[in-house]
Image (cartoon, rainbow, N blue to C red):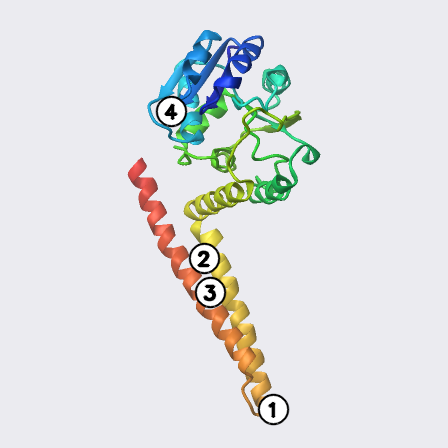
Amino acid sequence: MRTLAAIPCYNERLAIGSIALLARAHVDEVLVIDDGSSDGTAAVAREAGATVIRHERNKGKGAAVKTALNYAAANEFDVLVLLDGDGQHDPAQIPQLLQPIQDGTADIVIGYRELTQMPRLRQAGRLVLDYVTARGGQVITDSQSGFRALSRKAVEALLSKNLRANGFSIESDMLLAVRDLPLKIAEVPITCTYDVEEPSTKNPVSHGMGVLGKIIHSIAEGRPLRYVGVPGFVLIMIGFYFGLTLLRQYNRLGYFSLPYTMLAGFFIIVGVLGVFIGLVLNVISRLARERER
């Protein structure tokens, strides 16, 4: 199998050389996607023997990953390994991710971190995001891990889905895109180092909220009736329950309960809005899919 390691990076001059060199020992080619760096990242990567594709401006990690997917497909690589360029991932663990694909037991292999390896602020956020990106009842242990391997079949499937995320939500976007496809997902344990020379300056809380927002948007856009319309209908039923309780109380005691009146009105109004929005989004999403075809 021909293997490619792709490393999206932005201003990672200090780490990218050693990461590229270490990765070369385990794959046929190393690709560095320099996402508009201004610190000489591209030059260091070339000196380390990597193929470099440079974005003239910073487009986001998602855009860099999509560049890697297109390169892997165009050059007919059998396996694509994605890893970060800041030194948090250990290239020596690439063979562990390659093995399930080489054995034919998986199409996507995710390197998962034990929660105890992660800073406390990231742990709770990861658990929430793992649950949201659950695939057919299967909760991915580490849905946000950027250290993952993809078979050619998985690469082609992702490209056919026209991934939209350009930021840090790309890992979740990839899993959501293939959740209904017959692709086998496996997980292998990895170690991750957070004590790097230039760690990410992105606040983990704002990062997690941003990713969660993108995930919810993607889910609602893809299946608005299920994720917006159906909850709206449930809220209407809850409103009717409070309304019936209100009527029973009026028949028995002869007065309207203000709390029950407010609850019934609130749930019915919000529920009707949910159903209406779900129907509108469903029509819009169908028209968008037809236009893409």
According to the picture, the residue beneath numbered tag 3 turns out to be 271
Answer above or below: position of 117 versus 21.
below
Please say whether residue 48 is visible from this viewpoint.
yes
Residue sitting farthest toward the bottom: 254
Q: Position of residue 240 (x, y in %)?
A: 52, 73
Q: Quadrant of residue 259?
A: bottom right
* 10 Å crowding of disc 2: few (<14), some (14-19), many (20+): many
Cα–Cα span, label 2 and label 1? 36 Å
Image mark for residue 36: 4
User: Which of the numbered marks, if any, corresponds to residue 253?
Assistant: 1
Task: Tell me the kind of residue under disc 4.
Answer: Gly
| Badge 2 or badge 1: first in the primary sequence | 2
Nearest to the observer: residue 194 or residue 29: 194
> The residue tagged with tag 3: helix, strand or loop?
helix
Give the number of the disc on residue 220. none
Q: Nearer the viewer, mark 1 or mark 4?
A: 4
Which residue is at 46% across, 65% downward? 271
Side of 60 relative to 148 (left or right): left
Residue 229 shows which numbered tag?
2
Q: Tell me which amino acid carries mark 3.
A: Gly
Secondary structure state at the residue bearing disc 1 = helix
